[in-house]
């Protein structure tokens, strides 16, 4: 059948589509380590994630989680850093290590056919990292220099301060890098953190791409015979600070012409029933380019090039933050408009047309996420690490489609009280 290009194709709203998360397989290695894998995609490529409970939540000494992740592949019992990098480059592979608040993720990108040659290298990196003293000294020097440069940037300081205010500087989520903490790191600190937290007994492995039983067996060959014991979980209870001084103005550059604004509050994580509908409210308020904040403060007032609000859900809490940079002469005007938009959503329900646009944006983005194996794996990874099943994904779709303007107004009235927000301005 020849396509008639004179006939305009029908336009369908994203809310009318059915959404199904492709199934993921689960298989335990011989030592009980779970492997979640997804056979999808047509290219001979794969992604494997090793997820360890080795984030800021687990560290007993400030900055050690980031340092351990940063130096993990900089030397093992057998290979120097240069040899590891050369081996990865020979196979056209990439190995990334990233430490977050709750987890550290080690990710391998590779052609599927090279997996048997690459897994021995990854195994050595994960299990036999030595953190050479000279590599640590270079890391510390570079980290301090990078920190000093970043501290000149208003937005960097504002990000540090808002997290510290929301959670407290002693809380893992509110802790931030300091020069003295980096300089106080010793090789023994990294070795101890690695031994305790890069523990396969607590790890989970995720794999996607052109993969199947053969690749799972290959993983089992190199990682299924490793015996380890679960680490003692961090059961510390951190009390969130109560708001005393709500507004914080920080002078960072006497000659600065721009101010960084952060306005935020603590917010429940994905397990709270308000989280999923608030995703819709956040999108309407400041979560995409057509949001209320962007339309008012960027398009109408011209105070900024961009302004956004975002949710940051973690395993043990979360936050909701508005962030923007404006000219120093319009900082107060911009802040006033932010609270004005909060007030409008509390007192006037959004129109059905505006909400439909937001829903189409959210669900349309979700369609894109379900298009490739690595994006699908990310969806599953988030579900599994947070203790959810596919039902959570399906329930979110239902909420995104069915939430009403009055639902969002009630949420705004519950969470958009200016007295519950910290406000940081750095100039």
Image: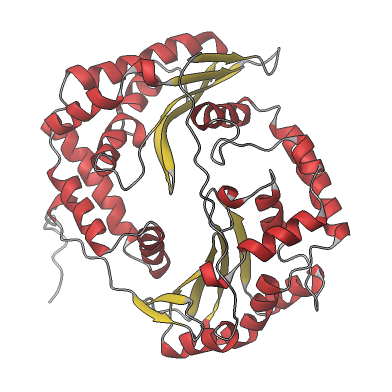
Q: Quadrant of residue 343?
A: top left
Q: Quadrant of residue 273?
A: top left
- The residue lying at 86 percent from left, 51 percent from top is 137
Q: Is residue 200 visible?
A: yes
Front in this rendered view, residue 310 or 219? 219
Q: What residue occupies the far right of the structure in this picture?
A: 134
Q: Is residue 122 left or right of residue 358?
A: right
Q: Is residue 357 above or below residue 59?
A: above
Q: Position of residue 113 (x, y in %)?
A: 54, 87
Q: Position of residue 45 (x, y in %)?
A: 49, 77
Q: Is residue 249 above or below residue 89?
A: above
- The residue lying at 69 percent from left, 34 percent from top is 150
Q: Position of residue 162 (x, y in %)?
A: 53, 27
* Tally of numbered discs: 0
Front in this rendered view, residue 273 or 195? 195
Q: Is residue 95 above or below residue 178?
A: below
Q: Position of residue 336 (x, y in %)?
A: 39, 11
What coloring was used for the rendering?
A: secondary structure
Q: Is residue 300 above or below residue 380?
A: above
Q: Is residue 13 visible?
A: no
If the image is split into quadrants, where does the N terminus sit?
Answer: bottom left
If the image is split into quadrants, where does the C terminus sit?
Answer: top right
Q: Is residue 44 left or right of residue 1?
A: right
Front in this rendered view, residue 392 or 213? 392
- The residue lying at 15 percent from left, 24 percent from top is 349
Q: Is residue 144 left or right of residue 299?
A: right
């Amino acid at each position: 059948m020849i396509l008639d290009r004179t006939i305009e194709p029908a336009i369908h709203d994203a809310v009318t589509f059915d959404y199904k998360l492709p199934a993921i397989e689960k298989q335990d290695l011989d030592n009980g380590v779970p492997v979640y894998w997804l056979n999808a995609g047509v290219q001979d490529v794969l992604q494997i994630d090793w997820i360890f409970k080795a984030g800021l939540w687990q560290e007993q000494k400030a900055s050690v989680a980031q340092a351990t992740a940063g130096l993990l592949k900089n030397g093992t019992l057998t290979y120097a850093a240069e040899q590891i990098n050369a081996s990865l480059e020979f196979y056209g592979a990439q190995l990334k290590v990233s430490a977050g608040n709750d987890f550290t993720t080690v990710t391998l990108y590779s052609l599927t056919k090279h997996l048997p040659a690459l897994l021995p290298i990854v195994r050595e990196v994960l299990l036999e990292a030595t953190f050479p003293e000279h590599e640590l000294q270079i890391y510390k020097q570079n980290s301090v220099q990078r920190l000093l440069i970043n501290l000149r940037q208003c937005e960097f300081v504002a990000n540090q301060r808002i997290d510290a205010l929301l959670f407290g500087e002693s809380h893992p989520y509110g802790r931030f890098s300091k020069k003295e903490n980096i300089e106080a790191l010793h090789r023994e600190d990294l070795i101890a953190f690695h031994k305790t937290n890069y523990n396969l007994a607590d790890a989970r492995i995720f794999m996607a791409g052109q993969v199947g039983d053969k690749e799972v067996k290959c993983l089992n060959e190199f990682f299924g015979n490793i015996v380890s014991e679960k680490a003692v979980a961090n059961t510390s209870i951190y009390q969130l600070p109560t708001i005393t001084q709500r507004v914080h103005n920080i002078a960072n550059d006497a000659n600065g012409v721009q101010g960084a604004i952060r306005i935020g509050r603590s917010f429940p994580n994905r397990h709270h029933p308000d989280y999923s509908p608030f995703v819709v409210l956040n999108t309407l308020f400041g979560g995409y380019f057509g949001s209320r904040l962007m339309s008012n403060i960027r398009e109408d007032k011209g105070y900024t090039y961009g302004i956004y609000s975002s949710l940051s859900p973690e395993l043990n809490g979360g936050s909701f933050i508005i962030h923007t940079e404006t000219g120093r002469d319009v900082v107060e005007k911009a802040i006033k408009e932010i609270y004005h938009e909060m007030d409008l959503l509390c007192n006037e329900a959004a129109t059905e047309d505006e909400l439909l646009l937001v829903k189409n944006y959210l669900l349309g983005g979700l369609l894109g996420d379900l298009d490739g194996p690595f994006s699908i794996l990310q969806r599953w990874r988030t579900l599994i690490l947070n203790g959810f099943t596919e039902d959570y994904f399906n329930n979110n779709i239902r909420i995104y489609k069915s939430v009403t303007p009055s639902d969002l107004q009630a949420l705004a009235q519950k969470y958009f009280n200016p007295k519950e927000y910290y406000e940081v301005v750095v100039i």
